[in-house]
Amino acid sequence: MATLWLLGSQCSFRQPWFEEIDKKKDHILLIEARSRSTWQQYHKQKLVLVFSIMRHFKAELEEAGFSVDYRQGDSFEEELQKHINQYKAKEILIHQPSDHRMERQIHSWKNKQKDVDIRMQEEGGFLIGRPEWEDLLPDNQKWQMDKLYRKFRTRFDVLLTNEGKPLGGKWSLDAENRKPPKKGLDFPAPAWPDQTTITKEVIADVEQHYTENYGSIDSFRYPVTADQAEAFLEDFIKHRLPTFGDYQDAMIPKDPFMSHSMLSASINMNLLDPLDVIRRAEEAYEDGHAPLNAVEGFIRQILGWREYIRGIYLRKMPEYRNVNELDHHRDLPDFFWTGETKMHCMQDSIGSVIEHGYSHHIQRLMVIGNFSVLAGFSPQQVSDWFNEMYIDALDWVVLPNVLGMALYADGGLMSTKPYVSSGNYIHKMSRYCGDCEYSVKDKYGETACPFHSLYWDFLERQRSRFEENPRMKVMFKHLDNRSEEQVQQQKETVDLVFDRLKKGEL
Ligand SMILES: Cc1cc2nc3c(=O)[nH]c(=O)nc-3n(C[C@H](O)[C@H](O)[C@H](O)COP(=O)(O)OP(=O)(O)OC[C@H]3O[C@@H](n4cnc5c(N)ncnc54)[C@H](O)[C@@H]3O)c2cc1C
Ligand code: SF4
């Protein structure tokens, strides 16, 4: 008789141990541990997501004939022990989680067990197995997502001709994913699932027990079962995938969803299998329903970026958590939790995180991430914020995306140059600037867009590191072409920006 202990992000019949367990004699253990939910001060919707998925899965397991021990308590360790005592369990089956801290906790608990046989195997939910990452990301080579993506396209036979070449002649159609938002651009609203009775109960519990946590809760609408996630995927494929490619990088105020899928939480929480999602998108291309730039762009995110990100985490933890190559230490301002800032782009991008636990990739990278690196915020405070506030955040996906991709805190493991820009990029790719208290046209002075002066200041601060970078030569040429008067005005403006930041007036 064995017990399969499933973590909150492993609630799926596709998890590998299901192939071995016997529902007539084995048990399933699920634990809602308060200690885990207070590791950080998570957005309320994130707690609702995890608990609701677990409670729904309990019901599904019981309906399928499994015996379930569902526990709520202070810690995993205590509840595990109680389960072992009560069920006289001799064998515990666990899926090795990707999360480093959780994995360490399990190992430390495992080492203390004398009378229980503990068997572990890797958790499902990824296309590439753990042991492979050592070879895929070797120490003596520069790591590149593009190369791996090609390999994975070939291995899984995705969007290939009969000769094994990429459909459309190119492996990546990234250049066709960058249309700015034209006037009047609008997208079909996502068909969010209704809140179930279980979800409503969870919301009430979270409201009662996590009063100090941030984020609005009533607008919770994410899928909490595999069926709901399946329907949500269908809706995306049908209505938004066709325009995903063109407007992947565009931003519109008050619409964080646009053509995006909002499937990250469902995939990360194992409600959906990533390969199934990829195949569905591929079918949409084959049926003539969605163009290649949309389908390839979408598949690249899952087959390329998502796997690569996990590979980096597995290869680089635990030291990765503390990287700070640019030596940034400024504290994160309060407006990250309130959204109260005069910068329209930041206010809207953070506002949607408070409201939905979500903003899309370019808002994360080129607005919030960009501002954070330009202002020199502590990378660890920024990654904590992302970890706490996003519905799809799990440590393995947050750290490489935030510390590596957005903040360059790992010194360029993931990119040859930092993703930094002045306000001009935001102006080009969004409709924020027309409705902002700052003017994107003003470079200096009281009304100047803060991104401009912070950008020049960043380049000055980091000159010795980036001046010789071939991809940044043009930036430094612009910097050095400024007159003395402009340099002086720039200095005064950036002092003003930092002063306002400090006083909470930015
Ligand atoms: C600073 C920063 C923080 C991020 N934090 C997270 C996070 O906590 N959780 C998370 O899942 N993603 C994170 N990402 C990656 C990406 O922004 C989100 O996966 C995506 O925005 C989720 O929204 P969506 O489902 O609508 O994605 P879509 O735009 O519809 O993309 C499709 C899918 O591709 C996958 N994907 C796309 N980009 C990435 C990526 N860089 N890494 C991993 N998967 C990717 C996701 O599964 C996503 O659902 C972060 C990116 C940045 C720059
Ligand atoms: S003017 Fe600057 S701060 Fe305002 S929305 Fe544009 S980029 Fe953002």
Image (tube, rainbow, N blue to C red):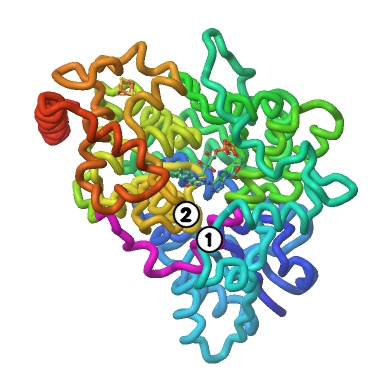
Asked whether the residues under the numbered discs 2 and 1 touch, taking CB atoms below 8 Å apart as contact, a structural biologist would say yes
Give whichever of discs 2 and 1 has the lower sequence position. Answer: 1
Query: Residue flagged by tag 1: what amino acid is it?
Result: Trp
For residue 43, side relative to residue 21 (left or right): left
Dominant secondary-structure state across the stretch colored magenta: helix
Relative to residue 440, is residue 120 drawn left or right? right
Among all residues in the image, which is located at the extreme bottom?
114
Q: Position of residue 259 (x, y in %)?
A: 61, 26
Instruction: Specify whether residue 313 is in view.
Output: yes
**Picture coordinates of residue 226 (x, y %)?**
70, 45
Q: Which residue is mark 1?
A: 143
CA gap, disc 2 and disc 1: 7 Å
Considering the image in quadrants, where does the N terminus appear? bottom right
Which residue in the structure is indicated by mark 2? Answer: 414
Q: Residue 409: x percent and y percent?
A: 34, 54
Residue 62 or residue 234, whichever sits in front: 234
Residue 209 appears in the rendering: no
Asked which quadrant contains residue 296, the reply is top right
Left or right: 383 as drawn, with respect to 113: left
Residue 35 x %, y %:
39, 61
Which of the 4 image quarters holds residue 20? bottom right
Q: Quadrant of the C terminus?
A: top left
Q: Is residue 2 above or below residue 439?
A: below
In this orientation, which residue lies closer to the viewer: 162 or 487?
487
Q: Which residues are magenta?
A: 306-326
Tell me the residue at 52%/20% (across/down): 180
Amino acid under label 2? Met
